[in-house]
Image (cartoon, helix red, strand yellow):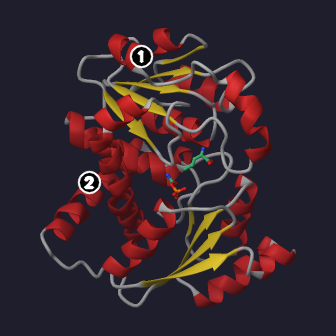
């Protein structure tokens, strides 16, 4: 695997291989088995948006693998003052073994990969969040025993998470239903692709989408970069919430996932969040293991 730019670039076999390696690395870490598979390698981590999980899990992941990581804030890089991505890519390729980037435009991540000569890993763009969904799939498999055949229901804004969940879910044989308001849908091409390649439905009816779901998923109503729309979005998304009514129509053993950070009483009630905190924090932990697998696949 050269890069991880978006999940659409991976086959279901490649996704399964990443998840298998992630399980192995998790087992080894829990049992104190050293795995210095990236000894002496350095990852540069460019952040143009905030992060808790992505930053810490990549940094700790590189350390666990015997390498090191550099935190590069766009505020301090010349990229923040207008140096072209094409030049940044060629310069960083001379120093580093890989780049993880969190930014706005997907095109910037693709350009970094095009002009650079080292692997590029997408740590979230406005378009997608592939690392998160690999951790989500890992968590679903851990809790449910398998991925295929489960119904995944996403409720809320049709954003970067929705795009990656649709691709990851369909590629791994899940039924995917989404409840999103009109005008706030995920990528149109991805919705069409999902309908042609699996079982995919969109509705504005939250309860209809959640019916018999095995996995319920939600994300913030206003993503990073949409802060100015937050108040307006609170009105638009009212009701697009995982709460007791939604849990009542889902499968009795349904699990609840959230990429975090969560806004209680907006996209999810505090009650449902706490009842499923074990799953949600396993999911957050699995960012570390899944990304270590991605790092090994790309950098080793
Ligand atoms: N879920 C996620 O990507 O979290 P951070 O924004 O904290 O990295
Ligand atoms: N949709 C959210 C995901 C955060 C992990 C955002 O882009 O802010």
- The reply to whether the C-beta atoms of the residues labelled 2 and 1 are less than 8 Å apart is no
For the residue labelled by badge 2, is the local secondary structure a helix, a strand or a loop? helix
Q: Nearer the viewer, residue 236 or 264?
A: 264
Residues packed near mark 2 inside 10 Å, few (<14), some (14 to 19) or many (20 plus): some
Q: Is residue 135 left or right of residue 279?
A: right
Q: Earlier in the sequence, mark 2 or mark 1?
A: 2
* Residue 173 visible in this rendered orientation of the protein: no
Q: Nearer the viewer, residue 41 or 180?
A: 180
For the residue labelled by badge 1, is the local secondary structure a helix, a strand or a loop? helix
Query: Residue 39: x and y, percent?
Result: 35, 87
> Which mark's residue is nearer the viewer, 2 or 1?
1
Query: Residue 135: x and y, percent?
Result: 38, 50
Q: Quadrant of residue 163?
A: top right
What residue is rendered at 50% in x and 62% in y? 52
Residue furthest toward the left?
A: 31
Which residue position holds label 2? 20
What residue is rendered at 31% in x and 78% in y? 64
Q: Nearer the viewer, residue 270 or 118?
A: 270
Q: Nearer the viewer, residue 140 or 56?
A: 56
Query: Residue 218: x and y, percent?
Result: 49, 33
């Amino acid at each position: 695997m050269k890069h991880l730019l978006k999940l659409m670039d991976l086959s279901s076999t490649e996704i399964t291989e990443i998840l298998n390696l992630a399980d192995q690395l998790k087992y080894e870490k829990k049992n104190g088995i050293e795995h210095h598979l990236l000894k002496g390698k350095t990852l540069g981590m460019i952040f143009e948006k905030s992060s808790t999980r992505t930053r810490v899990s990549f940094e700790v992941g590189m350390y666990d693998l015997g390498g090191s990581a550099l935190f590069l804030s766009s505020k301090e890089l010349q990229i923040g003052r207008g140096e072209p991505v094409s030049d940044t890519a060629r310069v960083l390729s001379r120093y580093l073994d890989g780049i993880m980037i969190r930014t706005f435009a997907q095109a910037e991540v693709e350009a970094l990969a095009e002009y650079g000569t080292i692997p590029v890993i997408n740590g979230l763009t406005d378009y997608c969040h592939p690392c998160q969904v690999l951790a989500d799939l890992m968590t679903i498999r851990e809790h449910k025993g398998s991925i295929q055949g489960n119904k995944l229901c996403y409720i809320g804004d049709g954003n970067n998470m929705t795009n990656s969940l649709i691709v990851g879910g369909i590629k791994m044989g899940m039924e995917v239903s989404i409840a999103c308001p009109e005008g706030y849908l995920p990528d149109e091409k991805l919705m069409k692709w999902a309908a042609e390649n699996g079982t995919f439905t969109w509705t504005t009816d939250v309860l209809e989408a959640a019916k018999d779901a095995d996995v319920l998923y939600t994300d913030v109503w206003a993503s990073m970069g949409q802060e100015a729309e937050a108040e307006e979005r609170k009105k638009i998304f009212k009701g697009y919430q995982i709460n007791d009514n939604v849990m009542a129509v889902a499968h009795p053993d349904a699990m609840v996932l959230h990429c975090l950070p969560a806004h209680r009483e907006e996209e999810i009630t505090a009650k449902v969040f706490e009842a499923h905190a074990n799953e949600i924090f396993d999911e957050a932990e699995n960012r570390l293991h899944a990304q270590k697998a991605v790092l090994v696949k790309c950098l080793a």
